[in-house]
Image (tube, rainbow, N blue to C red):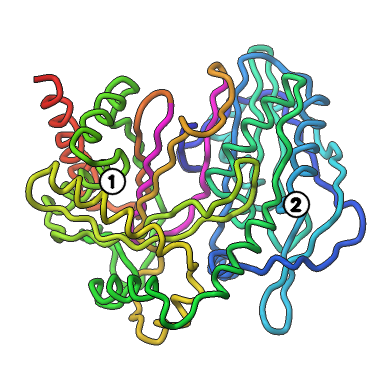
């Protein structure tokens, strides 16, 4: 899996085929409640902020469009979350679920005369116009076929999928294209019900709420924002741009993991330590506050947005390996805090939170080497929509090619300089681990 963003997306033109998912059967209200993540996202959409995620698969061969139409229809039918949508009610939002789906070809045209970047920009506009979660099955399903290859595009509003879900969908698509039956799907809505049940069981004396209180006290009762000046005035938001770097090759990632494991640390918190120390070296704090998206216990065949949020203070001073060890223990202690969900946190502390940035400084990590992924000659990408932002967000990921980072930031000259220098410092810290291992 490769991570990118719509402002840098490129798709080679060819024959464009689009399908439309048509609901089958009468919709019924789902018992799966709308999560705090979903409510926050839907409110952002209502204010005009796009929030879609696209999965693209580049096959090295030309694949018959009718076959692909059957494949995308099977994918939507397999996953109950993809057959649901949202409706506004007098007291908020609820979810409706259709029992079936029929995918019909909507458009077929030959596209030429456009650059790869211009064609991708046109596709992004179509995705933004399609992915309205207040309409039934608002998914953008398309393929571009050429004599030398095929690009399949499946885009969803973020309410329907997270990064892990897109990996599940990618693997299932390749199984279906190969004529094989993927493993049985698991209910994404059941995963959301389980999260809601866990949230409802939280009491005021739950020690995990105490963990959140200590974190929010440390942040001055504000939601974390990137701690370096990116040139954005309070209350402003600017177009988002993206930096993507490979931090460690596949072989170097293996050597890095081996070294930090011998020191009692784990790979993800070790990477976070290098990032935190780089931020601190650029003028940031000794304790870098961030939010870490976590798994929710959803099964391996589950598609839905079922991510938790763990608060983390990254220790960013002292000996590098000692800090890695501390942050490994801190991350392990923080992960259970995500299990209670955000609803009890807002209920307990919402009146004490102070206004800050509109976005949240998050540092995410997905290890795709631990997930089922397509065969090696299929290039899989996750494309995120472009929208205004006022802080930086970092996504680390690991795949067969190594460990990489995507940083999304408000596009200012200062942000480009600050983040570029910070990533350079982080790279030097990672390289120092490799050098110590080699000596």
Q: Is residue 408 above or below residue 377?
A: below
The tag on residue 80 is 2
Residue at 64% across, 12% down: 148
Left or right, 165 with reference to 279: right
Residue 381 located within the stretch drawn in magenta: yes
Residue at 84% across, 57% down: 98
* Magenta part of the chain: 378-399
Residue at 73% across, 38% down: 184
Closest to the observer: 437 or 231? Answer: 437
Which image quarter is the C terminus in? top left
- Look at the image and tell me whether residue 220 can be seen: yes
Q: Is residue 393 above or below residue 68?
A: below
Q: Secondary structure at mark 1?
A: helix
- Local crowd size for mark 2, using a 10 Å CA cut-off: few (<14), some (14–19), many (≥20): many
Residue 48 location in percent, x, y? Answer: 56, 65
Residue 309 located within the stretch drawn in magenta: no
Closest to the observer: 306 or 54? Answer: 306
Residue 26 location in percent, x, y? Answer: 91, 61
Q: Name the residue that disc number 1 marks.
A: 269
Q: Is residue 304 above or below residue 78?
A: below
Q: Quadrant of residue 193?
A: bottom right
Residue 422 location in percent, x, y? Answer: 19, 45
Q: Is residue 323 above or below residue 437?
A: below
* Mark 2 to mark 1 CA distance (whole Å): 34 Å
Q: Quadrant of residue 50?
A: bottom right
């Amino acid at each position: 899996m490769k991570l990118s963003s719509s402002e840098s997306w490129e798709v080679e033109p060819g024959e464009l085929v689009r399908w439309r998912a048509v609901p089958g059967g009468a919709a019924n209200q789902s018992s799966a409640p709308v999560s705090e993540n979903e409510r926050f996202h839907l409110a952002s959409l209502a204010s005009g902020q796009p929030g879609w995620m696209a999965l693209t698969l580049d096959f090295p061969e030309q694949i018959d469009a009718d076959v692909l139409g059957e494949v995308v229809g099977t994918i939507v039918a397999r996953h109950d979350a993809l057959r649901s949508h949202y409706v506004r009610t007098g007291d908020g939002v609820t979810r409706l679920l259709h029992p079936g789906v029929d995918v019909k070809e909507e458009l077929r045209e030959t596209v030429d005369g456009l650059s790869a970047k211009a064609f991708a920009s046109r596709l992004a506009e179509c995705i933004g116009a399609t992915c309205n979660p207040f309409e039934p099955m608002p998914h953008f399903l398309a393929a571009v076929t050429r004599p030398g290859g095929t690009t399949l595009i499946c885009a969803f509003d973020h309410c329907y999928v997270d990064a892990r879900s897109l990996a599940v969908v990618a693997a299932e698509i390749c199984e279906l294209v190969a004529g094989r039956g993927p493993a049985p799907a698991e209910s994404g809505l059941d995963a959301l019900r389980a999260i809601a049940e866990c949230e409802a069981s939280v009491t005021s004396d739950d020690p995990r709420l105490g963990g959140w209180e200590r974190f929010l006290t440390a942040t001055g009762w504000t939601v974390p924002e990137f701690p370096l000046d990116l040139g954005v005035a309070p209350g402003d938001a600017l177009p988002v741009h993206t930096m993507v770097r490979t931090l460690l090759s596949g072989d170097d990632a293996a050597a890095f993991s081996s070294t930090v494991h011998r020191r009692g640390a784990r790979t993800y918190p070790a990477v976070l330590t290098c990032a935190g120390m780089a931020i601190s070296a650029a003028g940031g704090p000794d304790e870098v506050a961030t939010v870490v998206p976590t798994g929710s216990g959803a099964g391996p065949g589950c598609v839905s947005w079922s991510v938790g949020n763990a608060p983390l203070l990254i220790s960013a001073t002292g000996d590098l390996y000692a800090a890695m060890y501390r942050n490994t223990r801190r991350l392990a202690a923080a992960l259970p805090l995500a299990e209670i969900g955000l609803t009890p946190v807002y209920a307990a502390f919402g009146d004490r939170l102070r206004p800050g940035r509109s976005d949240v400084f998050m540092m995410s990590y997905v290890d795709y080497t631990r997930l089922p992924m397509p065969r090696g000659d299929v290039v899989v990408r996750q494309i995120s929509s472009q929208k205004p932002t006022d802080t930086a967000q970092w996504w680390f990921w690991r795949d067969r090619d190594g460990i990489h980072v995507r940083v999304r930031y408000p596009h200012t000259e200062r942000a480009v300089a600050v983040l570029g220098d910070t990533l350079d410092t982080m790279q030097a810290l990672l390289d120092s681990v490799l050098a110590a291992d080699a000596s």
